[in-house]
Image: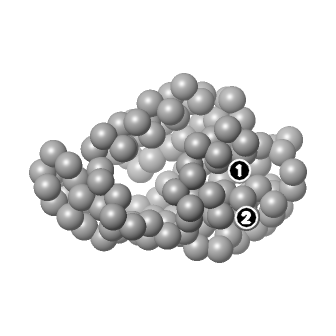
Amino acid sequence: METKEIAEKLVSWCNQGDYASCYQNLYSPNIVSIEPKGAQMEEVQGMEAVAQKGAWWEETFEVHSSKVSEPTVADNWFSVRFEMDTTHRPSGHRSQSSEIAVYQVQDGKIVKEQFFYDMPPSE
């Protein structure tokens, strides 16, 4: 798969809430996932660790809505913007947030994802 096709599939599946299809079909088994400094699970490697990160997210946040922008593609890289309305389950705090995600593609799979956003105040 070419980078543009991977990017379009990721956007489509994420907008449908079908994150499992992204992981199963688009990600390398050796994926590296990076969050901003100080975030929970700042950097994880491999599908098992990414799955644990996803499970933590689902346990910690209730997602009321989420939207992913159309991708911007450049060679083996693409980026999207996520807009989310979530409630932090432990505190009950509801907030709207946005972040930029940048993905690197090699050999038809996403090998790296990095998220950029302002860290919220401590819950």
Residue farthest toward the left in the current orientation of the protein: 91
Query: How far apart in space, not on screen, are marks 2 and 1 (Cα)?
Result: 14 Å
Crowd tier of the residue under label 2, counting other residues whose Cα lies within 10 Å: few below 14, some 14–19, many 20 or above: some
Q: Is residue 41 above or below residue 77?
A: above
Q: Is residue 112 visible?
A: no
Q: Along the line of sight, which residue is nearer the eye, 45 or 69? A: 69
Percent from the top left, x then y, of residue 27? 69, 40
Residue at x 24% of width, y 58% of height: 87
Quadrant in the picture for residue 53: top left
Q: Nearer the viewer, mark 2 or mark 1?
A: 2
Q: Along the line of sight, which residue is nearer the eye, 112 or 82? A: 82
Q: Which residue is mark 1?
A: 104
Amino acid under label 1?
Answer: Gln
**Is residue 80 toward the left or the right of residue 26 in the image?**
left
Q: Which residue is mark 2?
A: 8
Percent from the top left, x then y, of residue 101? 55, 59
